[in-house]
Image: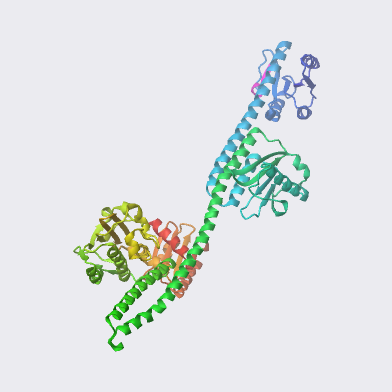
Amino acid sequence: MSKVLIISELSQLEQEIAEEIKKNGMEYLLSEKKPENIMQQAEIFQPDIILIDTNFENCEILTKQLKSKTQQQNVQILLLLEKDKDIDFLNFADGFVSTPICKNILVHTINSHIKIKKSLEQLGENNRELARSLYQLNVLYNTSSQFAGTLDKDKLYNIMLEALEKTLSFDISCALVFNTQGDNKLYINSLYEPTESLKEALALRVVLEYKNLFENQPLPHKTDLEGIEIIKNVKPSHIQNIYDLRALNYDSLFAPIKVGEHFFGVIELFRKIPFTKEDVTCFQTIVHQVALPLRSATLYEEIKNTNVKLEKLERLKSDFVSIVSHELRTPLTPINNSLEIVLSEQAGPISDDAKNFINMAKRNVVRLSGIIEDLLDLSRVQTGKLDFKYKITSLVPSLELIQKTFEQVACEKDIQVSLQIENNLEEVYADTHRFEQIISNLVTNALKFTPKGGSIKIIANNVNENEINKSLLIAPICEIKGNYIKISVKDTGIGIKKEDIPKIFEKFSQIENSLTRNIGGVGLGLSITKQLVDAHLGAITVESEEGKGSDFSIFIPIPDERKIFIMDINHALSSSEETGIIHIKEKLNCGFIDEIINANLIKLTKKSKEFRENNDYFVLLPDTSQSALDFMEKSVLSQIQKQDEKKCDIVFKKAHTNKDSKELLKILNKINI
């Protein structure tokens, strides 16, 4: 029933209007005469329409006050206005009715404004719903971005609960989270403190609802009340209130958290105010959103655990190979010495047959020694203990030595080994011994798989990055950029199938055919070669065709300052040398780092490098002793004490791990020094 408040000092006018309002089924109230009492009446009566006689005392002020007081309720204020009377506060009202009163016009005017009031209320409700929907959409969008930014399960659940709290304003949430290890957890988030009986009831309820999802089917996760850890989170509030078992009568929403057949948990929300259809849609959307990142997080966790196990197995295998190789090499030395003594003149004459057998034994000892040395080199590469002695050098003497070394062996197989070196071959930054090991491995392989009457060519020349066929590269560890020395070993051997080329650089790998089985070997030579080339920041390409031979080419970079530094720091950080790292972060762009550099407070050693990135200053000290690091720390800290201590953060540390090495190289590559 619509309500009308009548404000007038004329009793006859009030009665006339009241009778007509009553006749049309509306409720009315005659006002007090004092303005303060009228305001109180309006607050208690809560009218839909207020009729104010313009002849009422202080009508203008009262109209403004009533309009301000009732604006949020959309109360319609109509003035009772004498004909031809002009007033200047008509804009504060919503309409007027002329006096003397025409009953039909009065009723129609009141009914029209009641409809306007209802329309305004509906419009306000629609606007509120629209604003709420837009807010929910905004939360959903931000939540989706947050889900994509982490693979931490706990963070994902917290993001989900935060989004649900923002969009649905629940009183209590109850989430049962499954864990692959079986330690299931029940997260209870509530506005006020839940009683112990309520916590137990929530746990029982959510477990039963989870089991009801499957009826007679087997459960993806076994669960019982005793095996659930309850984690409670109550929002801080100045209101001292509790939730008891009556909270179970609140309106609730329940959903499983799953992707396909993969279950991660279930969640239920309780709210005193009933949920709307839009709330249900929002709830289901957020729960569905979190399921896919949880699946990714689970897979990531499984991969991490598997990698840890694989790394452990790899370490055990490397240790085993290293120990066995050392144990095998120990007896080989006295065996080889004994054979030398037997063959020597001091041991006396021996028959030709005996000499042949002893020479056969010696060849096999040498062969076995080579295999053991390969195993040891592989172990050293994997553990980062392979020593390098880099220097600026020419490769020509090494290439000439390799040709002479293999000429005699090749001659026995009727294979010609030739060497072609370009004039003015550039120098490189390399370990000569390891370079010779690389080329020797390639030539040894070529000799194994080249039949009698064949040929092997060793060719060395200068090239730039544009002359390298990058489609033939075997997984280089760094970008191919700049100038290189190309050394090719071409043979006329059996060749390799295109699909088998990547396999030959794997550890203990050999291509299966009759010739490789006859030749034997453990398949480590090319794997070690690849590791040694990588250590020189080089690359390998392979071209081959079955029955027509193979072309193995290695590319050693012509050094520049950056490449030399990367090789030095790689070696320093992966060897037993201690490495110092200084990182100064300038909090404000106040020039403090410039003061440190200009004052030469950080004394750099020969191999050290310094660089800046925005307000950060890094010093890398691959061969710095602890005493030198202590000196620099003391010097810089002394300078800091003279300045504002809030200007910068400074970190001094010793780096021993590969993790430190990788982080430094990331920084180095990022700023392209």
Q: Furthest residue to the left?
A: 423
Name the one closer to the observer, 668 or 420: 420
Describe residue 122's horizontal placement relative to residue 585 as left or right. Answer: right
Coordinates of residue 396 in the picture (x, y in percent):
23, 68
Where does residue 247 sit, x and y in percent of width and height?
75, 42
Note whether 99 is above or below 567 in the view shown: above
Look at the image and say whether residue 84 sits in the magenta stretch.
no
Left or right, 491 with respect to 525, comes to left
Report whether residue 562 is seen.
Answer: no
Identify which residue is drawn at 29% across, 59% down: 552
Of residues 663 and 235, which is closer to you in this image?
663
The residue at the point 33 percent across, 81 percent down is 339
Q: Residue 321 sits in which quadrant?
A: bottom left
Is 91 contained in the magenta span? yes
Colouring chosen for the image of the structure: rainbow
Residues 279 and 461: in front is 461
- Determine whether 437 is above or below 345 in the image: above
Residue 466 seen from this side:
yes
| Quadrant of the drawing holding the N terminus | top right
Examine the image and state in which quarter residue 216 appears.
Answer: top right
Residue 345, above or below 592: below
Q: Quarter of the image holding residue 104?
A: top right
Q: Position of residue 171 (x, y in %)?
A: 70, 43
User: In the shown orientation, is residue 63 left or right of residue 555?
Assistant: right
Where the C terminus falls, by quadrant?
A: bottom left
Seen at 33% across and 77% down, the residue is 362
Q: State which region is magenta.
A: 90-96
**Total label count?**
0
